[in-house]
Amino acid sequence: MSLNKIKIIWPNGNCSFEEPNSFWLDAAKKAGISIPTGCLTGSCGACEIDVNGKTVRACIGRIKTSKEKELSVEMSTDPYW
Ligand code: FES
């Protein structure tokens, strides 16, 4: 395992390790997590997830290195989707 990989904790409790700068949507797919999508261009918000409490649009968002070394993902609950 590369030292640069970041530990991701998914909503189902599973963990995976991803390279910084990977797209969230790709990382979720590899981990078997299904994130709803719409536009895939970053404008609709259907793919929003919360990463350590910050909302990220998974279709355009990339995994950033973090001081915490570990990122916890929750599905955003948007009443409009
Ligand atoms: S799918 Fe529309 S913002 Fe990501």
Image (spheres, rainbow, N blue to C red):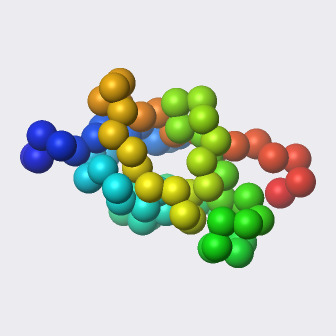
Q: Is residue 28 visible?
A: no
Residue 65 lies, in percent from the top left, at: 33, 40
- In the depicted view, which residue is nearer to us: 70 or 14? 70
Residue 77 lies, in percent from the top left, at: 76, 42
- In the depicted view, which residue is nearer to us: 5 or 12? 5
Q: Residue at x 64, y 73 (%)?
A: 41
Instruction: Kindly indicate the quadrant of the structure image that contains residue 55.
Output: top right
Image quarter in which the C terminus is found: bottom right
Q: Residue at x 11, y 47 (%)?
A: 2
Q: Is residue 20 visible?
A: yes
Q: Is residue 61 above or below residue 74?
A: below
**Position of residue 67 in the picture relative to residue 46 (left or right):** left
How many tags in the picture?
A: 0
Instruction: Kindly indicate the quadrant of the structure image that contains residue 60.
Output: bottom right
Residue 24 lies, in percent from the top left, at: 46, 56
Q: Residue at x 41, y 34 (%)?
A: 71
Q: Residue furthest top?
A: 68
- In the depicted view, which residue is nearer to us: 61 or 77? 61
Instruction: Kindly indicate the quadrant of the structure image that contains residue 67.
Output: top left
Q: Residue at x 39, y 45 (%)?
A: 64
Q: Residue furthest right?
A: 80
Residue 34 lies, in percent from the top left, at: 55, 60
